[in-house]
Amino acid sequence: MKKLEFTTVAAAVLTCLLLGGVAAAEEDCVEAETRAAIAESRQAPRETDEETVTIRNQRLQEVFRAYVQKQGGCATDAVIRRFNALVKEQGLTNFDDFLAAMTQPVRYVTDPASNARVPIYGALGSDTINPWLAAAAVIEDKPLEEQPMYHTAIRALQENVDFVLIGVRDPSLSLKMLPPEMVPNAKAAYAQLNPQNKFDGGFDHPLFYCVVREAAEKLFREDHPEAKITMADLVVPEAQGGFGIQSCLLCHERDHAGVYLRLLRQGMYLEAKAADLLAAQAASSVVAPQGEEHSHIKAEAKMFLLAAERVRENSADKIDMARVRKLLASEARGNVERLKPGYDDFVAALKQFQCMNCHSSEAQVDENSDPAQYGAYVLQPSAYHKTDNIVALAGLIDFADVRKSRLLAKAMNRLDHAGADQVTLTDEQAEKLHLALRQWLESYQGE
């Protein structure tokens, strides 16, 4: 653990000893020293909130290990809960906060295809929020430590919750916490993710997160694909039958305006995308009906804008609309948040032109062909890594003149491209990729 300021810890210990005999004050001294160490972890600001929380997590892991040793060396439920309480005293979050925000309340929806009642285990057990882990593969027969989903869950938790247990079993967690209808899926997910049964049927925090996400994904995408709620349904306050936005606030630094902006941007982007689709059809020599795609995009745009409006209405005293308008008006063309809504469409274009055959962390390439060896971008499929992926791509884009972007030049082998022997775009393909890139950058201007 980073060496703490001597005066902080020493003062805490001295205070304990002055309060009574050494033996009688020993437990109070341990807690006082732990409090001081936890408070010290707050003094680690970094450039971004995610970096700050990650560094704090690392320090609190060390504080926790020291605390466990002083409590007899066993991480019992009582020891974990007490440490969590000490963390809360300092205004920091722990996995108990994550569970409270993400797994409550339990609501039921009806599958119109089968008329079955399907449980939504809070926001975490739905299929409309936090799908970060869904794109991370489960590798058969690999131990938990080698599962991509497990590592994605670790990162997700470390960047958004101040203290989580990694590699240490939390006795309070079990499948009994899940709605009965979700348990069979959860048992199957546990066996696939953790074939060596680490934790003896129990969980550390990222494994629990993985198991619930896998169980929910199967429940809503395979077992009951018609049993859905939308984001607009989810953000309705609990008192009105919804789930509220506590889970959203965990990922937006508890900023209500951040949640509102994220939903508003998505709705605005989809509106622009629908308009582009109509314009493209009007300009085409081939008369094409609007079809299901346009209707679906318009419906999605309407839903996200409704979700944003519901957040604004129910959090009016917590959202500075003047600040929101200023942020929307001042967003730079290369702003990562502005680029998030259209990112998935552009990646679909990269897949179409086989770029992802090599430039994906899941690509099957030999060591000599790995783009990472040449400093090239390698996208990670999980939606949780969207920010990192956008930053990697943005470094190859000329925002002033998109056609001059290094991304296009390399795809056409006009610049040195180690993968040119496998994929080099034709002029026609390059023009289509250029159009996809321009649409990504310009469909939503943030105004």
Image: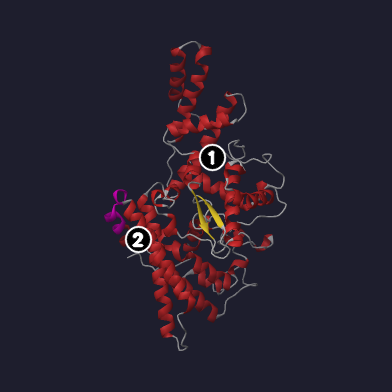
Q: Residue at x 43, y 53 (%)?
A: 242
Closest to the observer, 228 or 97: 228
In the picture, the disc for residue 164 is 1
Residue 301 sits in which quadrant? bottom left
Q: In which quarter of the image is the C terminus?
A: bottom left
Q: Residues within 10 Å of mark 1 (few under 14, many from 20)?
A: many
Q: Residues within 10 Å of mark 2 (few under 14, many from 20)?
A: some
Closest to the observer, 186 or 62: 186
Residue 67 visible: yes
Label 2's element? loop
Residue 233 sits in which quadrant? bottom left
Residue at the top extreme of this rendering: 21
Give the residue at mark 2.
Answer: 331
Residue type beneath disc 2? Glu
x, y percentage for residue 8? Answer: 43, 25
Residue 66 visible: no
In the picture, the disc for residue 55 is none
x, y percentage for residue 310? Answer: 36, 57
Closest to the observer, 413 or 267: 267
Q: Residue at x 64, y 40 (%)?
A: 202
Q: Is residue 97 magenta?
A: no
Label 1's element? loop
Q: Does the magenta stretch include residue 317?
A: yes
Q: Give the range drawn in magenta.
A: 316-326
